[in-house]
Image (spheres, rainbow, N blue to C red):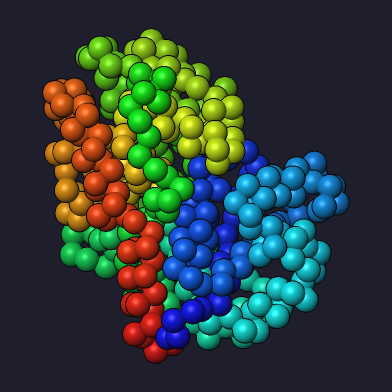
Amino acid sequence: MKSKLTILLAGTFAAAPHTGGVAWVVLQYWLGLRRLGHDVYFVEPLKPQALRPIQSPLAASANADYFHLVTSRFSLTESAALLLEGTRQTFGLAYPQLKEVARRADLLINISGMLTEEELLEPIPRRIYLDLDPGFNQLWHTVQGIDMRYQGHTHFVTIGLDIGQAGCPVPTCGLNWITTWQPVVLEHWPAAPLQRITCNALTTVGHWRGYGSINYAGTLYGQKAHSLRPLFELPKLTRERFSLAMGIHADERKDLEALAANGWQLLDAAHVADTPAHYQEFIQSSKAEFGIAKSGYVYSRCGWFSDRSVCYLASGRPVLAQETGFSRYFPVGEGLFSFKTCQDVLAGIEEMNRDYPGHARKAREIAEEYFDSDKVLQRLLDRIGTKTP
C-alpha cells in the first residue's frame, strides 16, 4: 500500500448532538490518521428521523450546528460532510465532492457500517468494517438476524481483542476479524497537571442503558445498569467519592433511589461532557476513572477496553476498569487496575492512594506505550496492506 493514502472515514457524532465522548471516538481516528500524513475525509450519514428539530432543513438543524462546532474546533470543516440518508443533501462537502473523494480513495474505514451509499462505497478498493461494539454487533447479526451491514466490506476490524479466540463465546459470523487497540492522539490529550484535579472523585461518562440487550446461550448480555447493580454499596465502603456523568431516564426510579441511598453522585452528562472540550475538561479534572463496562462485554470476555478509559490514561489519570479480558493485553496493577468485585475496587483504590503521583505517571506511560494513535493506526494500516481484498 502506498505511503500516503486518501482515506474516507465514515461514522457518527452529530446524530445525537452534545455527546462529546462520541465525537472523540471519531476524532481519534480522523486526527490520528492525519498525523500519519494521510488525506482523510469524513462523512456522517444522518437518518431523516434523527434531524433536530424533526423535519427541519439539514443546514438549519441542531445536528448541522454541532457538526460545524466539532469540525471547526479542529480545522476539519474542509474535509467533512453530513449526508442526509436517501438524498444527496449535504452539509459541508457537496455530494459531487464526496463522489470524487470516493473515486480516488485508497481506503474506507466504516464505523459500524454506517455508510451504505453504494455510489460512495463501490469505487474504494479496501473497505474496512470497524466494530466498536464487540459482542453485540455479532450477536445482533447471529441471534436476532439484524442486518449489521457487513456485506460489501473487504476487511473486518474489531476492538474486541478476544473475538475469535478460545474462551470467548461470541460468534464470528464467519468473518476473519482483525483486532486493534483503541487509539488516542497524544498531541490532543496531554498529561494534565495534578493541580487540574478539581473533582476529587472517581468519575466516568456514559449511559445507564444503551440498546439491544441479548439473551444468548442462557446468558443476558446486558448494559451498564446490569454491571453496576452488584456494586451499589461501594461508596459506603470507602471514603472515596464516586461521580457518574450518566444518562439515566427518570423512570429508572428503583435504580435512582438505590444510587442515592448508597451515596453515588449523579451528574448530567449533557452538561459536563456535551462538547469535546468539556468532555476532556471533565476527565482531566477527575482524580481517576471508575470504568463500568456493559455486562455484555463482561460476560462475553471479548477483551473490550473503553476509548474513554484510554483518554483518562493519556491525561495521567489512573483507571479502575471492570474486567472484560483486557488484562491479557495491557499491564494492570500500576496506573491501570482491573476489577470484578467490590473488594477488587477497594484494593485498587488503596494501592492508587499509596502512591497517587506514581500511578498517575504510570497511567500516562501505558497510554504512550499501548494506545498512541501513531502506533495503533500504523499497525492497523500495515495489517490491512498485507491482505488482498
Residue 124, position as x, y percentages in the image: 57, 83
Q: Residue at x 17, y 54 (%)?
A: 328
Between 152 and 121, the one nearer to me in the picture:
121
**Looking at the image, can residue 141 be seen?**
no
Tell me: residue 44, above or below residue 330: below
| Quadrant assignment, res 291 | top left
**Picture coordinates of residue 351, whole percent (x, y):** 14, 27
Q: Which quadrant is the C terminus positioned in?
A: bottom left
Of 178 and 141, the residue lying toward us? 178
Q: Is residue 316 left or right of residue 210?
A: left
Quarter of the figure with residue 272:
top right
In the image, residue 336 sits, relative to residue 261, either above or below, namely below
Return the x and y of residue 95 as percentages of the image width and height.
77, 71
Relative to 6, 158 lies left or right:
left
Residue located at (37% from left, 63% from top): 374
What is the count of numbered marks? 0
Q: Is residue 212 left or right of residue 116?
A: left
Quarter of the rendering containing residue 20: top right
As drawn, which residue projects farthest toward the bottom?
388
- Look at the image and tell me whether residue 356 can be seen: yes
Placement of the N terminus among the 4 image quadrants: bottom left
State the residue in front, 345 or 301: 345
Residue under the image location 35 percent in, 19 percent down: 200
Q: Residue at x 70, y 63 (%)?
A: 78
Residue 312: x %, y % from top left: 36, 39
Residue 19 higher or lower than 166, as above or below = above
